[in-house]
Amino acid sequence: MRILVTGGSGQVGFELQRSLTLYGEVVAPNRMELDLSDEQTVINYLQQLKPDMIVNAAAWTAVDLAESSSDDAYQLNHRLPKILAEYSARHGSWLIHYSSDYVYPGDGEQPWSESDTTGPLSVYGASKLAGDESVIESGADALIFRTSWVYGARGNNFMKTMLRLGSERTALNVVADQWGAPTPARLIADVTALAIDRIVQKRPIDAGIYHLAPQGETNWCEFAKLIFSEATKREQPLTILPNAVHAITTADYPVPAVRPQNSRLSLSKLEAALNVKMPAWQAQLILTLEEYLSMKGTV
Ligand SMILES: NC(=O)c1ccc[n+]([C@@H]2O[C@H](COP(=O)([O-])OP(=O)(O)OC[C@H]3O[C@@H](n4cnc5c(N)ncnc54)[C@H](OP(=O)(O)O)[C@@H]3O)[C@@H](O)[C@H]2O)c1
């Protein structure tokens, strides 16, 4: 089986290359080899490669920049998955695509279900929703994994930003009124591999949308505090003082794109479909942090 992984240099794409290698030949072109913003180039590439499965981890993920670069965000987040889904529908092959908590309106305190009404608050969220809708409309066999707060040992993410700021500053203000679950890229890749295993074994889970995140919930401020306390236990030389991580509100930290305050995602559909129990976000942080620190050569 030939699997095309797009966005292989990204957080999720990198982990996918590691997790999917047992299932066949994984082809992961970089931006120089395949510019995903050029529709005809993508169509030609698909015609030549003829992948048996596509895993689309590429996206425009610059959430704030999307507000002023709407066309670019839609090109990657809407039109690209549409092309990939149309190829998959024509060839009777599976597409695995990733989406976001940002498609939901972010109000209330209950975890979102996959069947809940969407209502994105930002251009990024709207572009991701348009991508999901085009995948579904294509009629392709497709899994859409909606995830939240992605981070990992590689790439740019909140954990690494906090570790950097925590070694430069003595105090930090962090937003404490947005709730969700930080999701390691590696967990996303592992769940994807499990889903692909089911497809290969000819007992696939139903096509459609699934939430993919660890169990539990937190806010950015509590997440930051756990990053600092676990890093300190591992003898990281942080300058941040204990009790100097201060909770602020979303209104105190204005950014161009509106963030959802409630990014909680119900996991019951995924857990039932794959017969798994998702792990707690805290344990996932420790594993990801240790991987990152060992990569830095400090543990
Ligand atoms: N990050 C989050 O917090 C988050 C939260 C919820 C959902 N998601 C979703 O999860 C999925 C994976 O996200 P991620 O965090 O792994 O993304 P990421 O680290 O930002 O990676 C994005 C990938 O897309 C590639 N890409 C973008 N434009 C391209 C172009 N024109 N041509 C070729 N490649 C291009 C990037 O290549 P370069 O390295 O060359 O730029 C990179 O490999 C996405 O669907 C995202 O929307 C992410």
Image: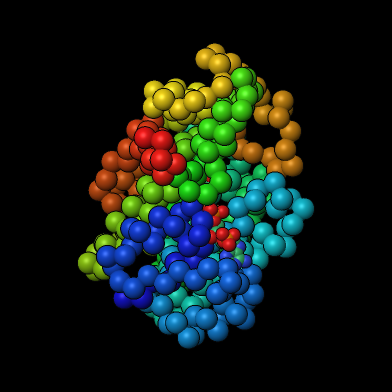
- Residue found at the very far front of the displayed protein: 297
Classify residue 32 by image quadrant: bottom right
| In front of the other: 158 or 251 | 158
> Where's residue 270, x and y in %?
35, 48
**Residue 176 in view of the camera:** yes
The residue at the point 56 percent across, 21 percent down is: 240
> Where's residue 276, x and y in %?
27, 45
Q: From this view, report whether residue 88 is shown above or below residue 163.
A: below
Classify residue 132 by image quadrant: bottom right
**Residue 129 in view of the camera:** no
In the picture provided, is 223 more to the left or to the right than 68? left
Name the image quarter holding the C terminus: top left
> Where's residue 238, x and y in %?
52, 24
In the picture provided, is 283 more to the left or to the right than 224? left
- Residue found at the very far top of the displayed protein: 243
The residue at the point 67 percent across, 44 percent down is: 121
Classify residue 280 by image quadrant: top left
Q: From this view, report whether residue 205 is shown above or below residue 278.
A: below
| In front of the other: 62 or 198 | 62
Q: From this view, report whether residue 91 is shown above or below residue 168.
A: below
